[in-house]
Image (tube, grey):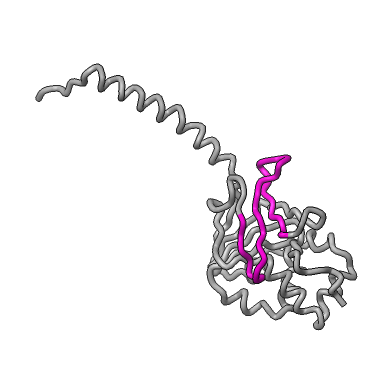
Amino acid sequence: MTKQRYSPISLIFIAIFLFTHFSFASPLASSRNRRFNPSTQRIEANIVDVLAADGNFTILLQLIDNAGLLISLREINNITIFAPNNDAFKDLSKNTLEALSKPENRPILTAILSYHLVPYRITWRDLPGNKLTLKTLLEGSTMVLMKSKEDPKVLLAINDAPRMSEINAEFSRIAYETNNGNIYTIDSVLIPWKVRWSQLQ
């Protein structure tokens, strides 16, 4: 069996290939590792039951119930909810929370909750290295996911309002993959631009 011999030119090309491959592969891998990567838990249950079992979303679940959306969230498939935890709602005034719970304000409550829902699954691999615009279930309204300018390890969900009314909701690293959708925890309630608190009765 004869050994394969390489010409000097072939050896030069091989050397160039190896140099470029190992020089550029490492920074790329490092860049990917800097992306937001929550500790996602896989649970064989629906979104509503997983939120209830967590214990930190009791206010959100009560409002979902008030809006008549509990059954829909149990049965709908392939959805993502950006779920404000209890602390997020406690940042709102008591009067605002009480107003949101009134039957006459159900359309406003439904609009706010719909704004936190995206009609497809978002996995952590989809979360942006830089910026991502998402269509929400509130017709005509989008939200933006992007890294914080102050700390690139922090991922923010930002509403569609102009600068003065912009809300930056920071992601927690607690996330769930359920049997009908994905859940990401955020620390603020996102208010879409078309909804005004002054509309609450």
Residue drawn at (75%, 78%) of the image = 107
Question: In the rendered view of the protein, which quadrant contains the N terminus?
Answer: top left
> Would you say 191 lies left or right of 98 here?
left
Whole-percent x, y for residue 43 in the image: 56, 63
Residue drawn at (58%, 54%) of the image = 40
Whole-percent x, y for residue 108 in the image: 77, 75
Question: Is 28 rendered above or below residue 39?
Answer: above
Whole-percent x, y for residue 148 in the image: 70, 45
Query: In this view of the protein, which residue sits in the foreground, 37 or 146?
Result: 146
> Would you say 172 lies left or right of 1 here?
right
Residue 145 is one of the magenta-drawn residues: yes
- Quadrant of the rendered structure where residue 158 is? bottom right
> Would you say 165 lies left or right of 50 here?
right
Whole-percent x, y for residue 114 in the image: 68, 70
Question: Is 161 rendered above or below residue 72?
Answer: above
Question: In the rendered view of the protein, which quadrant contains the C terminus?
Answer: bottom right
Residue drawn at (57%, 68%) of the image = 119
Residue 57 is one of the magenta-drawn residues: no
How many numbered markers are drawn?
0
Query: In this view of the protein, which residue sits in the foreground, 173 or 190?
Result: 190
Q: Which residues fall within the magenta stretch?
A: 133-160
- Quadrant of the rendered structure where residue 194 is? bottom right
